[in-house]
Amino acid sequence: MNKIVNGVSLPNMPWQDRPEGCTDTVWRYSQNPIIKRDAIPSSNSIFNSAVVPFKDGYAGVFRCDDKSRYMDIHRGFSKDGINWDIDDSVIEFQCEDGEVLVSNHRYDPRVCFIEDRYYITWCNGYHGPTIGAGYTFDFETFYALENAFLPCNRNGVLFPRKINGNFAMLSRPSDYGHTPFGDIFLSQSPDFTYWGKHRHVMHTVDESTSWQATKIGAGPIPIETEEGWLMIYHGVLTSCNGFVYSFGAAILDIDEPWKVKYRTRPYLLSPQTTYECVGDVPNVAFPCATLADQDTGRIAIYYGAADTVTALAFTTVGELTEFIKNNSL
Ligand code: BMA
């Protein structure tokens, strides 16, 4: 059975055993959604959000669209990873160069602990969507970094350690709108300012009915395992009724993570429950974070549902790896 490496022990992470009779590799939390759309006074919706272990509990960066439908990111804390206390005000970043702070929206955050700090990446509105970045040591003071890429780009997802001496980030070059295309690429940086050595990682699937036919994008921070980087990603199908967002997973080479070893042909989870199918954008399951316990191999997946609420699903590293290998493209 595959095992997590360089991980952490999280004996108290959210967990629920697979329901009786369920044969799926990924199963939903019975109390979904865990964060309702109106969990804070200002919010229209709270979804596509990121969580990490922090002190004796968890911290998170949440996408909250407000009632003017402005998209921004908010801080939250939780003791158990399920019940969250989210700030009603947005995260303010510090930077001496005001140009770095220019942003007309921020959404779909990811949080990644590397070495000594928590890096935050998000889709940043800077003359088009690009990958905004910043960091914090304590979730109290937040420092802005340069945008990683030129517009248009989305789904910037860091690896949790340097690879071959460089920071490594997945992203999905896109367009100004709802992007009817898109592959996953990897970029590298020695200093978190200058990104290069761009590599193609994964393409869409050339079968029009596939759940990953239209575009794909990295989801949570990849999990390091004995078999390679476990990367959960979303895929989009264009139906006669519009986009459908599901998610699957891949295993990437540990030293050259642009090399895909295995990748799921079927999805792991697709929008099927009411909270995934009904909301501001119907038929969306969009994962942005995991918590993983190195000791048991348990994985909790946080995903946005219908661009409205935040939900939780579970799997284990062993079962997920077997499924990916046995159902690979
Ligand atoms: C993408 C992003 C996501 C969103 C998805 C479905 O382009 O905007 O935040 O969940 O569309 O609307």
Image (tube, helix red, strand yellow):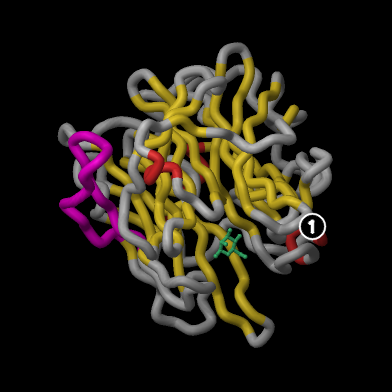
Residue 329 image point, x, y percent: 38, 66
Which residue is more in the foreground, 32 or 119?
119
Q: Image check: 288 left or right of 8?
A: right
Dominant SS in magenta:
strand
Residue 46 seen in the current view: yes
Which residue is more in the foreground, 318 or 303?
303
Q: Report the residue at 82% width, 61% height from top.
A: 274
Residue 307 image point, x, y percent: 69, 58
Quadrant of image for the N terminus: top left
Q: Image check: 161 left or right of 238?
A: left
Residue 298 seen in the current view: no
Q: Secondary structure at mark 1?
A: helix
Q: Report the residue at 28% width, 53% height from top.
A: 186
* Segment colored magenta: 184-201
Q: Amino acid at mark 1?
A: Tyr
Residue 192 in magenta stretch:
yes
Residue 148 image point, x, y percent: 32, 48
Q: Which residue is mark 1?
A: 275
